[in-house]
Amino acid sequence: MNTIVCIKQVPGTSKVEVDEKTGVLKRDGIDTKMNPYDLYALETAFKIKEEKGGNISVISMGPPQAMEVIREAFSMGADSGVLISDRKFAGADVLATSYTISQGIRKTGDFDLIICGKQTTDGDTAQVGPEMAEYLGIPHVANVRSILKIEDDYITVEMDMPNTVEVVDVKYPCLLTVEKDIFEPRLPSYKKKIESKDREIKVISLKDFEDKDENKYGLNGSPTQVERIFPPESNSSHEKWNGDSDEISKNIFNKLKELKFV
């Protein structure tokens, strides 16, 4: 079983500046971490490997410092890693990101299963995984909350829907996006960290892709146009009212009327 897990380096703080011209996050010089949802994707891959054997490769898209999360995945048990990195990929929306990663996956060789976290904490769209599957032409299941059966040619999963839980058989190759708490993520191993400290991470860029059309990547390949993006204003002002319930109710109504909420 050859499994690819998609992981991402995301800001480790909510205090991130936004480029007002491009509408993208300024990621330089900020604390980063592995996307929390990707930890559940990794653990799912480890559980599958424990049952069926095989190889786990992680793939990430980002600047050179994104190698840090690939090294972290090594210390948890991943076997190999690929970084998709090129300045021409910067500023990509979900569509351009999905296409870029799908092109990177095509360069990694054969696979049986791709596992993604449900979403990322910096984008929260939950669209990249399914869009990658569409570009790769493989079946996919989102919102997977448990793995029921792992066979040689298909996998059975539970999919968490808004009002129901559906059981689905999916043939390989396929893609799953998993919910948090599908498994409890393991901690990194210091022993594995030392063993993998010199392990090669393959870096691929646009020149390595089959499709080298620059208009499909980065800002050029992003149909989403951000009109305006800005951090929320901080407002700590408050008022304290004393009195009986009638007085306080009247004060609340008057304040809401003053603020034009009613």
Image (cartoon, helix red, strand yellow):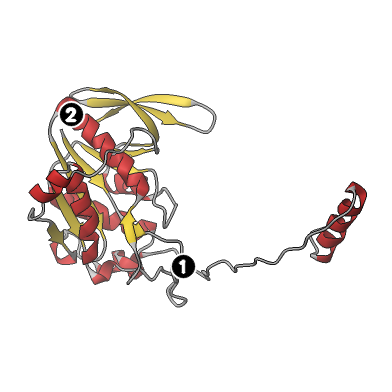
x then y, percent, for residue 244:
90, 49
Q: Residue at x 40, y 49 (%)?
A: 127
Q: Residue at x 12, y 56 (%)?
A: 201
Q: Is residue 142 visible?
A: yes
* Mark toward the viewer: 2 or 1: 2
Residue located beneath label 1 in the image: 225
The amino acid at mark 1 is Gln
Relative to 191, does residue 18 appear above or below in the rendering?
Answer: below
Q: Residues within 10 Å of mark 1 (few under 14, many from 20)?
A: few
Mark 1 lies on a secondary structure that is loop
- Which of the 4 image quarters holds residue 84? bottom left
Relative to 26, does residue 57 appear above or below in the rendering?
Answer: above
Cβ–Cβ under 8 Å for marks 2 and 1 = no
For the N terminus, the image quarter is: top left
* Front position in the image: 196 or 219: 196
Residue located beneath label 2 in the image: 50
- Which numbered tag is attached to residue 148? none
Relative to 39, does residue 221 appear above or below in the rendering?
Answer: below
Q: CA distance from mark 2 to mark 1?
A: 44 Å
Q: Residue at x 90, y 55 (%)?
A: 250
* Front position in the image: 24 or 73: 73
Mark 2 lies on a secondary structure that is helix
For the C terminus, the image quarter is: bottom right
Which residue lies most toward the bottom here? 21
Q: Is residue 160 left or right of residue 187?
A: right
Q: Is residue 216 left or right of residue 107?
A: right
x then y, percent, for residue 232:
57, 66
